[in-house]
Image: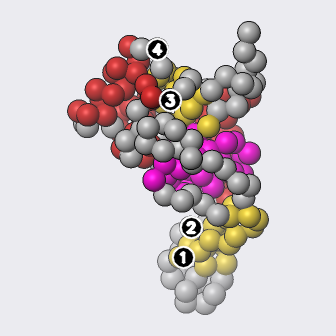
C-alpha cells in the first residue's frame, strides 16, 4: 500500500491548462476547482483534454472547503497579494486541503502571485513555462506623491494620490523541479 505522502497529486490552475499540460499525462491524480473549469470552458481543446482525463479517472473537479479558502485569503492579505482571482484562491485552497489530508500535492502554475502564496504556505509548486519566482515577496503599497507606505491598496489619506504597488523580497526560495509539457519533471 502506497503512503499518502508518496501518492502523486497535482493541483492545476488555468495557466497550467492553457500552457498545454494534459492531466492524463501526469503520473497520479490531478485536481482542479470548479472555477478553473469555468475559466477554461470556452477553449474546446482544453475542454476535450479535461473530459478525457476525467473519464480516465486522472482528473477530479473538487470544491475546496470554506475554511481553506478563508486561510488562503488571510495569508494573501498578509502578503499584500490583492490581484488573486477567486479561481486562484480556490486552487491554492485545494492544494492546502490535500496537504492537510496527508498528501504532498504539487500545484502547477505560471502565475507568480499563486507561486508566492504557495511558497508562504509551504506548499509544493512548479511552473510550466516560466522560470517561476526566485524569492518570496511581500507587496507594499506606497504613495508616489508623498512616499507614505501602506499594507493595503487605495488612495493616500495624506495627499490623495492613488497608491502604487512594489514587491519587497523577504527570502530566497527553496529549489524546485520544473514540469515540462508532457508531464515530465525536468
Q: Which residue is mark 3?
A: 26
> 165 left or right of 99?
left
Does 55 appear above or below 173?
Answer: above
First to last magenta residue range: 107-129
Between disc 4 and disc 1, the foreground one is 4
Name the element at disc 2.
loop
Instruction: Give the position of the N terminus as an image quadrant.
Output: top right
Between disc 3 and disc 1, the foreground one is 3
Q: Nearer the viewer, residue 112 or 75?
A: 112
Residue 185 makes an appearance in the image: yes
Q: Quote the CA–CA distance across marks 4 and 3.
A: 12 Å
Q: Which residue is mark 2?
A: 153
Name the element at disc 3.
loop
Q: Residues within 10 Å of mark 1 (few under 14, many from 20)?
A: many
Q: Which residue is mark 4?
A: 57
In terms of sequence position, does the residue under pointer 4 or pointer 1 come before the other? 4
Q: Are marks 4 and 1 in contact (CB under 8 Å)?
A: no
* Residue depicted at x 72% and y 58%: 173
Q: Nearer the viewer, residue 109 or 69?
A: 109
Amino acid at each position: 500500500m502506497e503512503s499518502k505522502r508518496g501518492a502523486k497529486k497535482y493541483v492545476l490552475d488555468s495557466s497550467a491548462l492553457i500552457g498545454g499540460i494534459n492531466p492524463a499525462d501526469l503520473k497520479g491524480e490531478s485536481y482542479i476547482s470548479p472555477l478553473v473549469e469555468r475559466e477554461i470552458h470556452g477553449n474546446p481543446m482544453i475542454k476535450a483534454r479535461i473530459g478525457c482525463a476525467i473519464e480516465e479517472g486522472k482528473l477530479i473537479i473538487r470544491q475546496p472547503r470554506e475554511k481553506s479558502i478563508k486561510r488562503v485569503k488571510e495569508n494573501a492579505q498578509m502578503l499584500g497579494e490583492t490581484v488573486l482571482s477567486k479561481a486562484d484562491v480556490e486552487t491554492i485552497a485545494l492544494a492546502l486541503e490535500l496537504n492537510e489530508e496527508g498528501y504532498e500535492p504539487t500545484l502547477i502554475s505560471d502565475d507568480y502571485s499563486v507561486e508566492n502564496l504557495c511558497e508562504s504556505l509551504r506548499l509544493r509548486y512548479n511552473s510550466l513555462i516560466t522560470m517561476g519566482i526566485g524569492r518570496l515577496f511581500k507587496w507594499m503599497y506606497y504613495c508616489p506623491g508623498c512616499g507614505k507606505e501602506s499594507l493595503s491598496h487605495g488612495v493616500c489619506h495624506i495627499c490623495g494620490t492613488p497608491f502604487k504597488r512594489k514587491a519587497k523580497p523577504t527570502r530566497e526560495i527553496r529549489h524546485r523541479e520544473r514540469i515540462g509539457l508532457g508531464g515530465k519533471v525536468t
